[in-house]
Amino acid sequence: MSFRFRNLKNGVMTLLMGGATLVVLVPLLLIFIHIVRSGFSALSPDFFVQIPKPPGEAGGGMANSMAGSAILIFLAATLGIPVGVFGAVYLSEYGGSRIATVIRFSADVLSGIPSILTGMIAYILLVVPFKGFSALAGAFSLALIMIPIVLRTTEEQLKLVPTTLREASLALGVPLWRTTLKVTLRSAMKGVTTGVLLAVARIAGETAPLLFTALGNQFWSRNLTEPIAALPLQIFTFAISPYEDWHRLAWAGALVLVTVMFALSLTARWFGREKHSNV
Amino acid sequence: MTTKVQLDNLNVHFGATHAVKNVTMGFRANTVTAIIGPSGCGKSTVLRSINRMHDLTPGARVTGKTLLDDSDIYGKDVDPVAIRRRIGMVFQKPNPFPAMSIHDNVIAGYKLNGRVKRDEADEIVESSLRRVALWDEVKDRLRQSAMDLSGGQQQRLCIARTIAVRPDVILMDEPCSALDPIATMKIEELIDELKEQYTVIIVTHNMQQAARVSDVTAFFYLGELVECGDTKKLFTNPDNRQTEDYITGRFG
């Protein structure tokens, strides 16, 4: 096979792969541009501080939804991060037992179920017995999505920590639990943080589980046992309504949501970058 | 000459594999004992049973008595963590903690176990680094990452870290095999100095190193102790035919 022919083949393949990349990137870009075009005009200071006004009245915003989403994510994280991280620590350091296998399997199953079902689990466990929709139920359903993601990525990162590091610590007379926390986990911290940030970005956009747990709220919520507004939920409500005003607000909300998720993903990548290589 | 560590009928099984068979030998205090033998003969396994590292290997079973100063370290009420404070270990590939500075690496044995006072820490760091002849090279960059040091420096750092907790015995598992000849020479000089204060047991696949560095040498083959004795004698006039074959290069 001559050099020119191989070169040509190389060029053709590179073009094809470039084309495949474009096929993926172009729709993404088009969606983003469309959202910006449709939503940018509705962005205003009012949008960020006001709650929705009745259709027909000008103005109004999605402040309560943004605050609600932030609260839901925060609550979900307070349950999701410790359970995920420490569950992974248990699995990776003490993971030979049968219980560990069961936990790992359960996490895999949980990560595979459609998000609307986690909403149903939260509905059965927290909405029905307490006879009301609540922010807590919404946060719980989001945590159920978060836990398996954090658990899996943390376990992967812990596995990457070389055994010699653990051995070095143990050989110094440091007990296993301290070694696990202060050496193994500490070494894996960068990867774990990236995993957590990506899990947060994921639940920021989840809508289905909130449908019958947090329910949504047109006003500010006063406490966590009441329904609460959430950005994706509110976008949905506005989008299927027949009112033009609300449609514009929905586009603006979508723009905000996409921007936040993009920022979170970028932060996660920046965090996970290689600063210097280890010998 | 007192015996610091005594192995009495030591046997180590990994599942069905009988890796170390009926080893009985003593390690004298303040001497350097080298353990030599071909790959897979059980040298590292014997070494690791002395500081109970096999506790962490699932499926490993250690039987027989291992005495440190006449008390069995595998006794019922003995805390393995306490044993590892008295018996330190230096590994084949230098393994300083990457997330810590040079200073923190040296006092890691204290820091990881709780808080340590600043001046005490600084004192321990300086004396340990001086002991391993690393102080002058790193005294101006104690707060920098330990990963910026060369391989030889990292290994000396690991030795400093080991002696900082003031053990009685230092186990070394092929400490120079990842290093260049100059670094190796520096560490061998260090081992010679360390024996004044500590009992050193070194596993090495390098026979010349064993001859240079140790007072007593033990030759292992297929999990069994074949011969153990004064280094000069073992290398010039061994009692056992297998030993002679090994050191003259007829096998292994």
Image: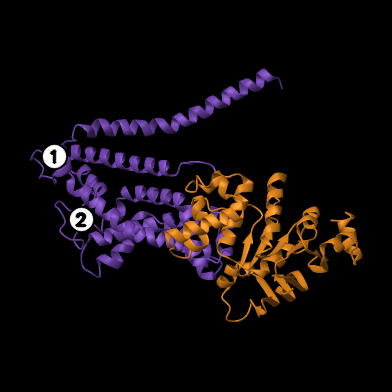
Subunit under mark 2: A
Subunit under mark 1: A
**How many residues crowd around disc 2 within 10 Å: few (fewer than 14), some, or many (20 or more)?**
many
Q: Nearer the viewer, residue B152 or A114?
A: B152
The x, y position of residue B32, in whole percent, is 73, 63
Label 2 amino acid?
Answer: Ile
Q: Chain B drawn in what color?
A: orange
Q: Residue at x 55, y 57 (%)?
A: B127
Q: Which chain shows up in purple?
A: A
Q: Residue at x 37, y 56 (%)?
A: A145
Q: Which mark is residue A46?
A: 1
The x, y position of residue B247, in whole percent, is 86, 57
Q: Is residue B205 visible?
A: no
Q: Residue at x 22, y 47 (%)?
A: A66
Quarter of the image holding residue A135?
A: bottom left
Residue B93, compared with residue A42, is above or below; it is: below
Instruction: State the separation of the CA atoms marked 2 and 1.
Output: 20 Å
User: Residues at badges 2 and 1 in contact (C-beta under 8 Å)?
Assistant: no
Label 1 amino acid?
Answer: Asp
| Element type at mark 2 | loop
The x, y position of residue B75, in whole percent, is 62, 80
Provide the residue designation for mark 2.
A228
The mark nearer the N terminus, 2 or 1, is 1
Q: Nearer the viewer, residue B64 or B109?
A: B109
In the picture, the quarter occupied by the N terminus of chain A is: top right
